[in-house]
Amino acid sequence: MKKQTIGSLKQLRKKENRMGYLFASPWLIGIIVLGAFPILASFYISFTSYDMSSAPQWVGLKNYIILFTNDDVFWKSLWNTIYHVVIAIPLGLIVGIILALLLNNKIKGMSIYRTLFYLPCVVSIVAMSLLWMWLFQPQFGIINEVLSPIYNLFNMEPILWLQSSSTSKITLILMGLWTAGGSMVIYLAQMQDIPTSLYESAEVDGANWIQKTFRITLPLMTPSIFFNFIMGIIGGFQVFTIAYIMTNGGPAQSTYYYAYYMFDKMMSDQAMGMASAMAWILLVIVLIVTMFALRLNNKVVYLGEEG
């Protein structure tokens, strides 16, 4: 009787597994056809000369050698991207944390303020880019109009923002802070999980708001901070749209990011082999940087009593 029960349980488990695979099959087929196959195909194409009008011709490591040894634009685009990542990620983390701290108060109408700060995250990036192009316009943009008294006081020329190679990169970074509401929501969610008893105990010991923030809030927020840090690295190395719309990679290729150069190699030059090689180089760079960051996880992230 016991053997029959065990046998029937095994048959039931197999049936459930088959049904599970059946229901998951559309997703699995999509991943294989639309994900795995293109990835493997791009790896092969990266070792070929392929212009999409004729069959790929095997060239071995030639694409990689040209990029590393005979392509100054490759290195410039990589430098522009690294500059963006190094500056934009810390600023984004700081602004998101400050917003979360300010909006983590139980006062009337706070949900409205939280919604307003999050709204830019759901706005089309194209519409957002066009709006900021107008705001940063040197002659009649609102930002320079607001700053005109300062220009006049110090006898300064108006900042050219997107039209100068010395300010274009930092301008795009500052514009990106407008969407800090996305990380803010994650920080707020974690703040809500911090036990109020910790703050009450700190108040009994005479701790002020700054001490509670740096001794309780921020340490307990490190998991969400680290998550946004990793996601920022991955997204930062793929920056493309804002430069494509707002600056067209200029002026003087100052905003010609890595993804933008890869796009041009693919669409303008029809060099699919070179573009695929750049894609795999980018994958390796992001993988190395992310793995290095993950090694810091146990050192900088609070994992609770069990961690």
Image (tube, grey):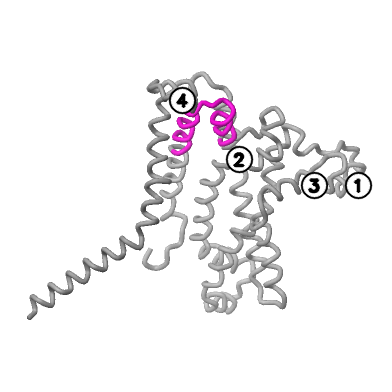
Residue located at (88% from left, 47% from top): 145
Residue 236, by quadrant, is: top right
What whole-number distance in Å separates the C-alpha atoms at marks 4 and 2? 23 Å
What whole-number distance in Å separates the C-alpha atoms at marks 2 and 1? 34 Å
State if disc 1 and disc 2 touch (CB < 8 Å): no
Q: Label 1 amino acid?
A: Pro
State if disc 4 and disc 1 touch (CB < 8 Å): no
Looking at marks 2 and 1 on the same chain, the residue that comes earlier in the sequence is marked by 1
What whole-number distance in Å separates the C-alpha atoms at marks 3 and 1? 17 Å
Range of magenta residues: 259-283
Residue located at (55% from left, 27% from top): 74
Q: Label 4 amino acid?
A: Tyr
Q: Is residue 220 above or below residue 227?
A: below
Q: Label 3 amino acid?
A: Leu
Looking at marks 4 and 3 on the same chain, the residue that comes earlier in the sequence is marked by 4
User: Is 247 on the left or on the right of 1, as rendered?
Assistant: right
Q: Label 2 amino acid?
A: Phe
Q: Which residue is mark 2?
A: 240
Quadrant where the N terminus sits is: bottom left
What whole-number distance in Å separates the C-alpha atoms at marks 4 and 3? 42 Å
Residue located at (71% from left, 46% from top): 129
Q: Which residue is mark 4?
A: 50
Q: Which residue is mark 1?
A: 149
Which of discs 2 and 1 lies nearer the camera? The answer is: 2
Q: How many marks?
A: 4
Residue located at (54% from left, 21% from top): 71
Q: Main secondary structure of the magenta part?
A: helix
Q: Which residue is mark 3?
A: 135
